[in-house]
Image (tube, rainbow, N blue to C red):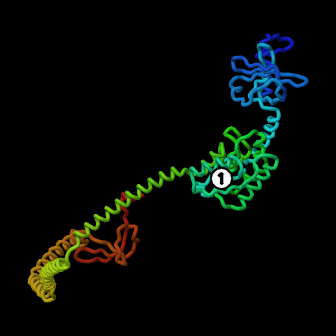
Amino acid sequence: MTVATDNTPVSVAQLNRQAKFILEQHFPTVLVKGEISNLARPRSGHIYFSLKDSEAQVRCAFFRGQAARQRAPLQEGDSVLVRGRLSLFEGRGDYQIIVSGVMAAGEGALQLEFEALKKKLADEGLFNPERKRPLPERVTRLGVITSSTGAALQDILQVLQRRDPGMEVWVYACLVQGRAAAADIRAALARAVRDNAVDALLVARGGGTAEDLWCFNDEQLARDLAASPLPVVSAVGHETDFTIADFVADVRAPTPSAGAELLSQDQQVWRQQFSRIEGQLQQSALRLLDQRRQQVAHLRQRLRHPSERIREQQQRLDDRSARLERAWAVLVRSRRQRLTAAQSRLQGVSPINRLHHQQDRLRSLRERLPGVMQRLLRAWRNRLEQQGHALHLSSPLATLQRGYSITLDSEQKLIRSVTQVEQGQPISVRLADGQIAGRVERIDVARDQKG
């Protein structure tokens, strides 16, 4: 966007566009009080007028979509409150209010007070859904807080008589219009809470102007409704009317009749349920009766004369006696077989039999013993001869018989080297057939042993 400055020229359209943007950004919503003048209704359905006071005026555009929802017609010279947003009509360079709603000036003051209280209580959480209590599934006693002479009570009673004639209705009469109405409604609510005789409360009033319904916008009444231990349904005015009581109550009904329908159960529904249950009970009874008949018929077929049962039991006794005799015979035969087998096994392990067997074995061993001893002696003799021959071959005596001798010192220790003797030392020489005593006369060392 090109911004208009002292050194940068812009077109008129650009200037108006910038001004429109600034107005719409800084004044999203305004509420302006003034008098209607220059009222115009072209065929397009839009409404154009000026809103003025003693010092200034501003143009207003009430487009068709919003104007169609306006309840009261606009008149030249009306003192009104206009809600809307600021904008600029670029074609003429006129700034204007794009109107979203118009209300009479007195009604507008009440609306401002209503919005302020609504915001305050909403910020405190009195409208939060989680705070609200569910309605009972079945209301048998209903407390109605309304005027005893108003049409709303008659509408409620007619609905209840048509839908749920058995419901018990407790009427807590009070004013529902005027300065003292809010306090009177609070007193009726306090009586209902103190009695604690009903399942739920219906706070109701017929339609009217905002001033007529204003008692239901009382702050203290709203707090009492929120603190009520009994579930509360608010049914004030017509469907388009909203009060603070509607927002703080546990449930809002658009009309008193709708509130009565909400808290009652249609007897036609009950009748249909009773009819369905009655049909189900009849079918169950018929099925049960048929089952009992079948059981009786079955038992009748099973029922027999006592003599027949006695004969049957006698036959059963004879059969079991025969079976017992057969079983006894089988048992005796089995036990005899087991006894015979045990005797055979016992005879096989008898000490006499074992003694005879051992005697036969001893006799056989005794007969075999001389031959076994002879074989063992021959084997040992052969083995001794072989070992003697081997010992003779490795004996020193055999070596001596081949002409060799063994030299011993005085202690009969074998002399293996000339280093073991000294000159003059007594020695003995053993030959195959004897021994010679001598003395060392000279020691000659073999050449290959010298230094």
Q: Is residue 83 left or right of residue 440?
A: right
Q: Residue furthest right?
A: 55
Q: Is residue 225 left or right of residue 314?
A: right
Between residue 338 and residue 69, name the one nearer to us: 69
Give me the residue at 43% from left, 56% from top.
278
Does residue 444 appear in the picture of this structure? yes
Does residue 341 appear in the picture of this structure? no
Relative to 198, residue 65 above or below:
above
Quarter holding the C terminus is: bottom left
Give me the residue at 78% from left, 31% from top.
103
Residue 22 in the image, given as x and y percentages of width and height? 80, 22
Residue 424 in the image, given as x and y percentages of width and height? 39, 74
Relative to 5, residue 140 above or below:
below
Local crowd size for mark 1, using a 10 Å CA cut-off: few (<14), some (14–19), many (≥20): some
Identify which amino acid the numbered label 1 is placed on. Answer: Arg
Say which residue label 1 marks: 133
Give me the residue at 27% from left, 71% from top.
405
- Locate residue 292: give its quadrant: bottom left
Between residue 25 and residue 438, name the one nearer to us: 25
